[in-house]
Amino acid sequence: MRPSAAAPPPTQHAELLAWVNESARMCRPDSIHWCDGSEEEKNRLTRECLASGELEELNQEKLPGCYYSRSDVNDVARTEDLTFICTRNQADAGPTNNWSDPQETYKKLADIFKDSMRGRTMYVIPFIMGPAGSPFKKIGVQITDSRYVTLNMRIMTRMGRIALRELGSDGEFTRCLHGKADLNPKRRFICHFPEDNTIWSVGSAYGGNALLGKKCMALRIGSYLGKTQGWMAEHMLIIGVENPQGKIHYVAAAFPSQCGKTNLAMLIPPKSLPGYKVWTLGDDIAWLRIGPDGRLWAQNPEAGFFGVAPGTNYQTNYNAMASVQKNSYFTNVLKTDEGTVWWEGMDNPPKHGLNWAGKDWTPESTDKAAHPNARFTAPAENCPSLSPEWDAPSGVPLSAIFFGARRARVAPLICESFNWQHGVFLGATMSSETTAAATGAVGVIRRDPMAMLPFIGYHVGDYFAHWLAMGEKLGGKAPKIFHVNWFRRDAGGKFIWPGFGENLRAVLWAIDRCEGKGKAKETPMGHVPTPDSLNLQGLNLSPETVDALLKVDPKDWTEDLADQRRFFDKVGDRLPEALRQEQEAFAKRLA
Ligand code: SAT
Ligand code: MN
């Protein structure tokens, strides 16, 4: 191995140095580069990526600092079937995770990593999840042989010198080893070793598989650390909702991937709701802790947005569009002949371009322009609605938590739980239609508790118990829990709720309820708004549509209940008794 530069590694952290050396001995890179996070480093990596074809330059007048990339055609989404939780005890991974034995897994993956970085540089990326100095923050160090991953980590995390400073000479860190290897899906494994605070991911360069600070550390390892340390890592956006009088309530909302988290996070109020403002704090992940005041505080550990491109436009999400106009990466969208980008649902299609698979594309083409899971990576600072509190060291106090599903039927627009325990039940029994964010069938209903099904780093029953325990600690100071569904359809399959900016109307009802206002009707599922308590001014919805939106039909729910029961049976003997009781109480209310 050629020693990278003459410069010694920029840390005295013995454990970190030993781990980097050990990884280098296994992967055999040509050189090692310790990332410092500087502009100079970014420019150099970008030049190298342009030369190698990993990135293509976009029109620098129209999209300054923006670059284009295409992934391997079979590396476009998270691969849940290749994702493993490797606990010593199989039972501790629980029935919703793939499990494999830690020692065997290290060995199997070591064979794939062996010599896999020959001819490449190994990048060592120290990074912080959360703002430097925050009590929420955690440090990770990612090793990778991908420049694309390194550049994306630079947007999604606070990385480089700042993280090494924070780590000191003996701080704790999550070991995140990543290698592209040969991108062969047969040799692709995303493995988590929560008991060792370690992640090994090989064979994929796709966001959720390869930017290890995100799903792997901030959610899977994070949820495990949260369980053992008394906090929570959740798949939630965070917003601040300011009323015309200037009062702000903070809300965190869990939705499965591709169900509109980024849209809600960056919502612009409709003209018919003047004086309101929605502030963006995070669009994907929230870390939650009980503050000194006994309330639940939330912080976004990320520093950028890794959002879904298709469907995003200046009407559906102005702030996201504004966020990607500079210093952003576009992956698997269409590149136009003038060096700009396009995707389905953006605006009028270009006459010609090269699509996500690199093929000629015109509006007549039957191929997709962008892959349905095409993504942008944009720095949070680009977002016009970014809250001044987004990097507050102690986070923001939550008034409400939303669990959101994508359900064509059954679930009403919004429903308030009777209390925390019932809210946990609503979260635990969430189900949603699958999307293109993961490989596999799209549009199939699956149970996705708290939108965390693919991200809980331990036994789902213990995870539910942890939610309940947090509620006990929060007592009367707990945020209220709501269930929402923007995706209800009529018999013809048409969405009956306009969604996007109009979702604020449901959010405002929830805030009213937090303030002890807002009328509600009790249903078996919880409290649903009375039609007159929702501000629908300017929407032109027929009374029948409003009824359909708010409807909780015991018949529909009886079917759903049967599936819920099967899911709880699958959770097995670690299912908290309190949730069984909630289910029985729900069954009684339905009957
Ligand atoms: O997994 S990603 O972070 O790449 C996107 C998602 O599924 O939320
Ligand atoms: Mn997500």
Image (cartoon, rainbow, N blue to C red):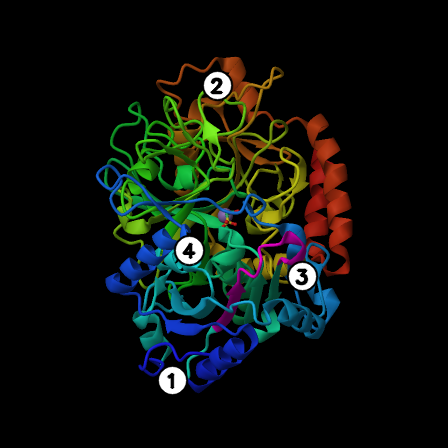
> Mark 1: which amino acid?
Ser
Q: Position of residue 417 (x, y in %)?
A: 55, 42
- Residue type at numbered disc 3: His
Q: According to the image, label 2 marks what residue?
A: 364
What distance separates the C-alpha of mark 4 from that of mark 3? 33 Å
Residue on which the image places disc 3: 459
| Mark 2 vs 1, N-terminal side | 1
Badge 4 element: helix
Which quadrant of the figure has residue 363?
A: top left
Give neighbour class at mark 2: few <14, some 14-19, many 20+ (Cα, 10 Å). Answer: few
Give the CA distance from mark 2 to mark 4: 32 Å
Mark in the foreground, 1 or 4 = 4
The reply to whether the magenta stretch includes residue 187 is yes
Mark 4 touches mark 3? (CB < 8 Å): no
| Element at label 1 | loop
| Residue 385 rendering spot, x and y as whole percentages | 28, 42
Please state if 80 lies on the left or on the right of 145 as rendered: right
First in residue order: circle 2 vs circle 3: 2
147 relative to 1, above or below: above
What residue range appears in magenta? 174-188
Let me know if residue 273 appears in the view: yes
Question: Gap between marks 2 and 3, in whole Å?
Answer: 49 Å
Whichever of callouts 2 and 4 sits on the residue coming sooner in the sequence is 4
What distance separates the C-alpha of mark 1 from that of mark 3? 33 Å
Q: Which residue is mark 1?
A: 169
Q: Is residue 582 left or right of residue 378?
A: right
> What mark, if any, has residue 148 been given in the picture?
4
Is residue 77 in the magenta section? no
Q: Quadrant of residue 166?
A: bottom left
